Image (spheres, rainbow, N blue to C red):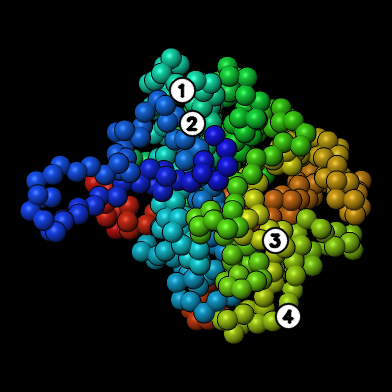
Amino acid sequence: MTGPWTRRSLRYALAVLPLTVVMLACDALTNLEQENPSQIFADDAYAPQNATLLVNGAIGDFECALFRYTTAAGLLGDELVNAFANAAQDNYDRRSHPLTGPYAGDCGGVQLPGVYTSLSVARASADTILARLQEWTDAEMAPGVNRTQLIGQAAAYAGYSLILLGEGMCSAAINIGPELTPEQLFGEAQTRFNTAITAATTANDASTLSLARLGLARTLLNLAYIGTPTNPNDPDPALVAQASALAAQIPAGFAVNAVALATGTARQQNVVFAHSGGTGSSNFSSVDPTFDSLKFAGILDPRVPVNNTGVVGADNATILRQQPKYPNLGSPIPFPRKTEALLIEAEAKALTNDLDGAVAIINALHAATDTLPAYDGTGKTQAEVLAQVREERRRELFLESHRLGDMRRLNLPLIPAVGATFPRGGIYGDQRCFPLPAVERNNNPNIPDV
């Protein structure tokens, strides 16, 4: 199935709406047995003939979560700043989330983007249909449906939900289980991607195979840096090599987009634009000033477009810097693409002192812009080339969900510094990730309260 319908969450497409209608017009009606033909129960929905719809519903859940995560992580990281007069929204930018903050929410909000529940729902949706697909047989599928292909898709999207939980959350839980560290979450993602790679290979599904390989490369790169917070230039070489080998298999031009619908419901819209697009209410956030007028060798970098309006936002303090990268509510967000793969390869080359190889990738990326001059690696040290590779990541992957994870794995400095005065009161905190929220701690018997 294709089209907007297939991108809606099952919580909408297959919602159960209990309704008791009491008719008192005549006594006879009170004795009639009536059914609601539009009512679908979970046990009925999770049937083999609905497999494609269920996988598409899980993809829709992930896309909704990605829109919100990219925005929230941009605020907690260094891509966006708050520009609206809202105390709860200040906490995203001030790095001071209480455990009851709106970051714990689901896909219902735009102004205060929910991260934990939205990603957890996306992970659960994908894992649930994945488990059913592994139980069902090919013969039970609807005509023309490739069960193995669907297994690959469901596993890949479960993996990406776990990547974002690992990169963005300080910790998380799965299915009311124990509190998991980022390392454990990446381990779970690795398992899903291995399943996806096996299934996509069997099904000859090239797109899902690249999706899973690049997801696994991102996962392994994260795992390579676990335990090296004070020395980000010394990750696990074996894991870096594995990540690079996977990235090298991604074909030119590869990209998968999270689909947005300008005329759809809020859950289907590009929340980054809604926050910082510059039209109507799209002024909740502003691009961080460190991205304003970024240049390379005196040339404005087209990969990080910023429109500095010079106008102060509703908070009466922040200049509105709009991002035109996503020009409307229907703009898609890429979450894996070939450029990311190249940057993983470049980082691996720089770490192994193949500086010429890393510089060649940087210059290929510059050439693709048609405006940026080449990076001259002559006489550059390994540390200098590695720093340039990471700066290329900051620019190439601007507002594509990567920056907060990079800040964590590379232990990058927080700007403004911890303890600096926040413009609307208080001081900047030290949060580098979203803390496990109270909604999980209070409802999960396997996690103690704090």
Mark 2, mark 4: which one is toward the viewer?
Answer: 2
Q: Which residue is drawn at the image coordinates 66% and 25% (left, top)? A: 206
The residue to which callout 1 is attached is 142
Mark 1: which secondary structure? loop
Q: Earlier in the sequence, mark 2 or mark 1?
A: 2
User: Which quadrant is the N terminus positioned in?
Assistant: top right
Q: Earlier in the sequence, mark 1 or mark 3?
A: 1
Mark 3: which secondary structure? loop
**Disc 3 to disc 2, how far (Cα)?**
31 Å
Residue 52: give its label: 2
- Position above or below: 370 against 364: below
Q: Percent x, y for residue 383? A: 76, 47
Q: Percent x, y for residue 366? A: 85, 48
Q: Earlier in the sequence, mark 3 or mark 2?
A: 2
**Crowding at mark 2 (Cα within 10 Å: few <14, some 14-19, many 20+):** some
Determine the image quadrant of residue 133: top left
Q: Earlier in the sequence, mark 3 or mark 4?
A: 4
The residue to which callout 4 is attached is 310
Q: Earlier in the sequence, mark 4 or mark 1?
A: 1
User: What residue type is disc 2 on?
Assistant: Thr
Q: Which residue is drawn at the image coordinates 69% and 55% (left, top)? A: 398
User: What residue type is disc 4 on?
Assistant: Gly
**Disc 3 to disc 4, how far (Cα)?**
19 Å
The residue to which callout 3 is attached is 327
Q: Earlier in the sequence, mark 2 or mark 4?
A: 2
Q: Which residue is drawn at the image coordinates 50% and 50% (left, top)? A: 65
User: What residue type is disc 1 on?
Assistant: Ala
**Disc 2 to disc 4, how far (Cα)?**
48 Å
**Crowding at mark 1 (Cα within 10 Å: few <14, some 14-19, many 20+):** some
